Image (tube, rainbow, N blue to C red):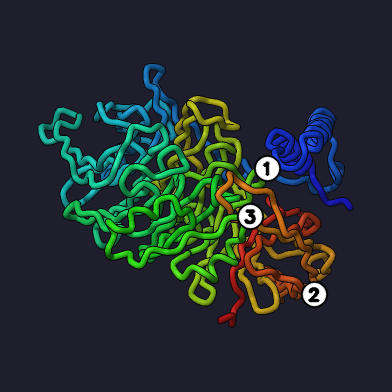
């Protein structure tokens, strides 16, 4: 085989260890055997540093060569635990906390850490998980458990002295899991609010499991049902809203959902509130447990399957904050794509979507690991860099620290990566950041494409099921070497297609920084 670099062995070791810890299907003896074997292999790989191709001429480059993680020093007397972030017109970064405070981070882009300082601007709230600044009225809007509060400093003393309830038209029971999430203002002046289910499973408080829009007048417009435990929401350049939904009941992976008004997003527990949403009628039928998303989408007209299903453990385990790259190239070549944080894996992943027959579908791939806490909120700065807030209390994360504030900065160098991926009638079109080695790229054996899906059921999570292997029958390389068209036999609607390209090289002999990309396929061009 060959082609795997040293970083691949450590990634494989981590994957095996995760699988061993997370094994929960099959017989008890089988789970124990899988766990012991996986852990043994993982430990061997980590201790020896052994890897296929470790002695090759062109070792795999590190992520840090292209995107630096810059820690923002936090004063020792502040417990930050970020929940939301927003940039203000003067360049100050507002950071809200799970402990109900808002800090202003002054000069956050300064290369000199000593010039960055924190000011506690507001306090006394309850788990603030989203911030949005309104340039029209000068208020900072904050969502806490029971309401959206708008705040302002009207006397110039350096902290908020006005706290006003803007909207509180939803239920709250005091359950630990009733997290609130909020977008920035959309083009119509609305805020998009996501309300997680009570206890992660049920819905005993009004509109739990829903997406609501809050108008400029503070009125609620029910917008989507079917959420479970989203943890991030963002708007693209068209004003469309997307969220990251966490794995659990009715979700085998972490779902990247398009919040299309009037649609049902997949979890039926909140459907009891349709009587309070006359604009959303009729109520969708509940999905059949032990089915598949693709099957139920044919039966339920209101059901909007995830645009992208992020494979559980392989890419992340706790999807959270979302950034739509609107920097115009200041953050590298990925303008117009999404960057999605993961709390458990302490990483940032990259997503691309396309409309096929009127429905969004697309891909995800790894982007940047190595953050020091569990990533939750993320926001793009005026200079294009991305700020990520980390929190780990009560939520375990790879990063380990209880909290952090970090900035991702492009170094100006571009890695050899898959830039974009589009489905065609007979396969996939791939675009790369560098010209490929044409001889290697034109060889079908360079690629492999297993496919699989998850069980769509009321139980928590799912194994990968219905596995197939698609066949790459030909690979056509463009004259400039930056595009490859794969002709494929065996694409499966409703499946995640896991494209491996470990053997691929660019014209200079470098491997892909991230050689696996996952495409969620709902339909092919021309389908009815």
Per the rendering, the mark at residue 455 is: 3
Q: Is residue 433 visible?
A: no
Neighbor class of circle 3 (other Cα within 10 Å; few <14, some 14-19, many 20+) is many
Vertically, is 92 above or below 478? Answer: above
Residue 282: quarter of image = bottom left
Residue found at x 55% / y 35%: 371
The image shows residue 14 at horizontal and vertical percentages of: 72, 37
Residue named by callout 1: 62
Residue 156: quarter of image = top left
Q: Is residue 407 visible?
A: yes
Q: Choose mark 1 or mark 2, whichever is in front.
A: 2
Residue 75: quarter of image = top left
Neighbor class of circle 2 (other Cα within 10 Å; few <14, some 14-19, many 20+) is some
Residue that lies at the very extreme toward the right in this rendered image = 1
Q: Earlier in the sequence, mark 3 or mark 1?
A: 1
SS at mark 1 in the image: loop
SS at mark 2 in the image: strand
Residue found at x 71% / y 55%: 465
The image shows residue 187 at horizontal and vertical percentages of: 28, 62
Q: Nearer the viewer, residue 179 or 203?
A: 203
Instruction: Report the side of 156 relative to 498 (left or right).
Output: left
């Amino acid at each position: 085989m060959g082609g795997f670099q040293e970083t691949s062995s450590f990634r494989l070791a981590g994957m095996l260890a995760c699988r061993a810890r997370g094994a929960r299907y099959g017989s008890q003896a089988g789970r124990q055997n899988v766990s012991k074997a996986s852990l043994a292999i993982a430990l061997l790989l980590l201790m020896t540093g052994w890897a296929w191709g470790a002695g090759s001429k062109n070792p795999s480059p590190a992520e840090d060569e292209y995107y630096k993680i810059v820690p923002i020093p936090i004063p020792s007397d502040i417990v930050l635990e970020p929940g939301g972030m927003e940039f203000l017109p003067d360049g100050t970064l507002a950071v809200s906390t799970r402990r109900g405070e808002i800090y202003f981070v002054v000069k956050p882009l300064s290369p000199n850490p000593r010039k960055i300082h924190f000011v506690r601007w507001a306090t006394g709230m309850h788990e603030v998980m989203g911030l949005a600044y309104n340039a029209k009225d000068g208020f900072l809007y904050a969502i806490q458990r029971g309401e959206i509060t708008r705040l302002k400093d009207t006397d110039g003393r350096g902290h908020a002295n006005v706290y006003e309830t803007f909207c509180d038209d939803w239920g709250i029971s005091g359950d630990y899991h009733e997290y609130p999430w909020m977008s920035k203002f959309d083009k119509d002046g609305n805020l998009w609010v996501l309300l997680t289910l009570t206890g992660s499973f049920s819905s005993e408080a009004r509109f739990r499991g829903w997406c609501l829009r809050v108008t400029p007048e503070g009125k609620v417009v029910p917008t989507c049902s079917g959420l479970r435990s989203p943890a991030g929401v963002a708007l693209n350049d068209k004003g469309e809203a997307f969220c990251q939904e966490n794995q659990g009941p009715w979700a085998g992976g972490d779902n990247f959902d398009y919040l299309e008004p009037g649609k049902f997003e997949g979890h039926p527990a909140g459907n009891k509130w349709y009587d309070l949403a006359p604009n959303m009628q009729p109520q969708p039928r509940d999905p059949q447990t032990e089915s598949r998303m693709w099957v139920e989408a044919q039966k339920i007209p209101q059901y909007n399957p995830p645009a992208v299903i992020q494979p559980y453990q392989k890419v992340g385990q706790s999807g959270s904050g979302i950034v739509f790259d609107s920097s115009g190239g200041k953050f590298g070549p990925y303008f117009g794509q999404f960057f999605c944080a993961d709390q458990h894996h302490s990483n940032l992943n990259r997503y691309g979507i396309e409309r096929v027959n009127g429905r969004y579908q697309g891909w995800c791939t790894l982007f940047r690991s190595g953050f020091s806490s569990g990533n939750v909120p993320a926001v793009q700065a005026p200079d294009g860099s991305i700020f990520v807030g980390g929190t780990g209390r009560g939520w375990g994360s790879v990063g380990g620290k209880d909290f952090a504030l970090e900035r991702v900065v492009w170094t100006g160098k571009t890695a050899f990566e898959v830039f974009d991926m589009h489905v065609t009638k007979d396969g996939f079109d791939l675009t790369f950041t560098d010209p490929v080695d044409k001889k290697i790229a034109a060889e079908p054996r360079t690629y492999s494409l297993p496919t699989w899906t998850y069980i769509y059921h009321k139980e928590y999570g799912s194994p990968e099921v219905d596995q197939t292997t698609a066949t790459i029958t030909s690979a056509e390389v463009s004259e400039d070497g930056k595009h490859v068209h794969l002709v494929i036999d065996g694409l499966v609607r409703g499946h995640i297609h896991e494209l491996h390209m470990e053997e691929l090289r660019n014209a200079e002999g470098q491997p892909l920084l991230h050689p696996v990309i996952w495409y969620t396929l709902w339909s092919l061009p021309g389908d009815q």
